[in-house]
Image: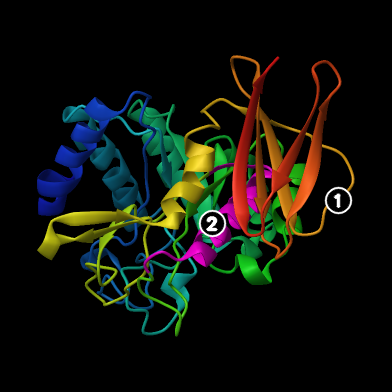
Amino acid sequence: MLQNFSLAVEDLKYKIPYIIAAQKMNKRNLTLFGSPWSAPAWMKDNQNMTGKGSLIGQPGGKYYKTWAQYFVRFLQEYSKHGIDLWGITAQNEPSDGKLPNFKFQAMGWTATQQRTFIALDLGPALEKNGFQYIKLMILDDARFLLPYWAEQVFSSPEASKYISGIAVHWYEDFITPTIALSSTHQKFPDKFILATEACAGSILPFGKVILGSWERAESYAHDILQDVNNWVTGWTDWNIALDMEGGPNWVKNFVDSPIIVNAKKDEFYKQPMFYAMGHFSKFVLPGSKRIDIRGSEVDGLQISAFLQGDNSIVVVILNRSENDGIISLHDPELGYINLSYSKHSIQTVIWWT
């Protein structure tokens, strides 16, 4: 099946070589997940990879079976190059493909369509071809769709058995309370929640690159802390590096990034967002467990604590207010430490038990 399937030029020229280079340079295991944006145009009812469109037919039909095989072949071809993915999402932003005149590659799904596709097509295809270990995630869209989307998909035991987690994007977080996350976890504690896409500068008229923006660094740390304090197990930036315009992007959707490359000067700039992410990616290691931290609330502070595999404890403290202050961290076995914090600051504290 899919005898004419092949990876795209960008896979072979850009993605795979850079992934391999990153794997060689990385001292930790590099955890990778994939996310499809659209099936080929010939498989869709609008005959286009962009705009409002879905797969032709219904789950269980030949187009859905074929699309499931695309996942399998993608995983197989990357594996041939020494790249084994940890996870995949069933669709990037399935709500986008329901919008008229949507400019990006997109493919529309309802929660019930995704549920049936996984139960009849994608789940069995992954299992049959030896990819049952792949962490399959649903949604991959804004958290305001929770817990509804999860309720619909997990109502089917046949679909649920193939699914490991729920993927969420950050773009409407400012209008969606975190109860959407915590209530979803309470209903489905056996499914992890992973934040799979975020970027600054995506909302007009405040888009594009702003060099040295501390406000955007704060927004990153604020969203990460909101997420991890409500059962989200990881947080992913959409772009790690972009050019001075916030691209390249074929639909001119220019945004900001933790690293900005100035090709004309052969320079790159680490943005404040880069260092905000570092408070988590550098110190909160894979396998860490978030632990409860109790005490009186301090206006403007967000705090999260993590227990590491070596029994060290990491506490990340974000102050988004205009106030300086002092906070005392108490450990019942080791004592306490008084910390001063400055206005609009992030700091990380580590100690060993």
For disc 1, the neighbor class at 10 Å (few under 14, some 14 to 19, many from 20) is few
SS state under label 1? loop
Residue pointed to by mark 2: 220
Establish if 44 lies above or below 21.
below
Q: Residue at x 68, y 42 (%)?
A: 231
Residue 172 image offset from top left, x and y in percent:
58, 69
Q: Residue at x 36, y 84 (%)?
A: 101
User: Is residue 224 one of those drawn in magenta?
Assistant: yes
Question: Foreground mark, 1 or 2?
Answer: 1
Residue 273 image offset from top left, x and y in percent:
45, 55
Establish if 180 lies above or below 326.
below
Q: Is residue 225 left or right of residue 122?
A: right
Q: Which of 81/304 is in front?
A: 304
Which residue type carries mark 2?
Tyr
Residue span colored magenta = 211-234
SS state under label 2? helix
- The reply to whether the C-beta atoms of the residues labelled 1 and 2 are less than 8 Å apart is no
Q: Is residue 4 visible to us here? A: no
Residue 353 image offset from top left, x and y in percent:
71, 14
Q: Is residue 173 visible to us here? A: yes
Q: Residue at x 71, y 37 (%)?
A: 189
Q: Which of 10/234 is in front?
A: 234
Q: Quadrant of the N terminus?
A: top left
Secondary structure mostly taken by the magenta-highlighted segment of the chain: helix
